[in-house]
Image: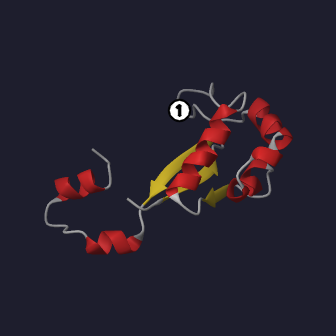
């Protein structure tokens, strides 16, 4: 299914080791994620789901990514987004099938 990943920094997980590592490894960071990794912005959206997963893989491979408090375990928060046009093409009469279609269940 087509989609995107949005990412935002987790304000409740300071992750200083991750941020230092992210800045040191910007050359290998996916281009769409660089403004977040270098601190120029607090959120971004991937151009595609595949590129979003590459960004998540890059981010999670760096030291300090995990290990935050229970309510904010990672340095970044990821959310899968589905294009609006896809929702318009779905039959909303059965909410269970909708949830299955967008991989929620």
Q: Position of residue 30 (x, y in %)?
A: 70, 52
Furthest residue to the right?
A: 24
Q: Position of residue 93 (x, y in %)?
A: 14, 66
Q: Position of residue 69 (x, y in %)?
A: 59, 27
**Which sits in the foreground, 87 or 1?**
1
Q: Residue at x 57, y 34 (%)?
A: 72
29 left or right of 56 in image: right
- Residue 75 seen from this side: no
Question: Which residue is denoted by mark 1 in the rendering?
Answer: 71
Furthest residue to the left?
A: 93
Furthest residue to the top?
A: 67
Mark 1 surroundings: few (<14), some (14-19) or many (≥20) residues within 10 A: few
38 left or right of 70 in image: right
Q: Position of residue 10 (x, y in %)?
A: 63, 43
Residue 16's place in the image compared with 1, above or below, is above
Residue 88's place in the image compared with 33, above or below, is below
> For the N terminus, which image quadrant?
bottom left
Residue 6's place in the image compared with 65, above or below, is below
- Residue 59 seen from this side: yes
């Amino acid at each position: 299914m087509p989609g995107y990943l949005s990412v935002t920094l987790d304000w409740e997980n300071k992750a200083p080791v991750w941020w230092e590592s992210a800045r040191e490894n910007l050359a290998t960071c996916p281009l769409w994620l660089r403004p977040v990794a270098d601190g120029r912005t607090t959120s971004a959206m991937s151009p595609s789901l595949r590129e979003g997963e590459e960004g998540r893989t890059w981010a999670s491979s760096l030291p300090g990514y995990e290990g935050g408090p229970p309510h904010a375990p990672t340095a970044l928060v990821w959310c899968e987004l589905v294009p609006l046009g896809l929702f318009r093409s779905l039959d909303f009469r059965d909410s269970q099938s909708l949830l299955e279609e967008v991989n929620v269940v």
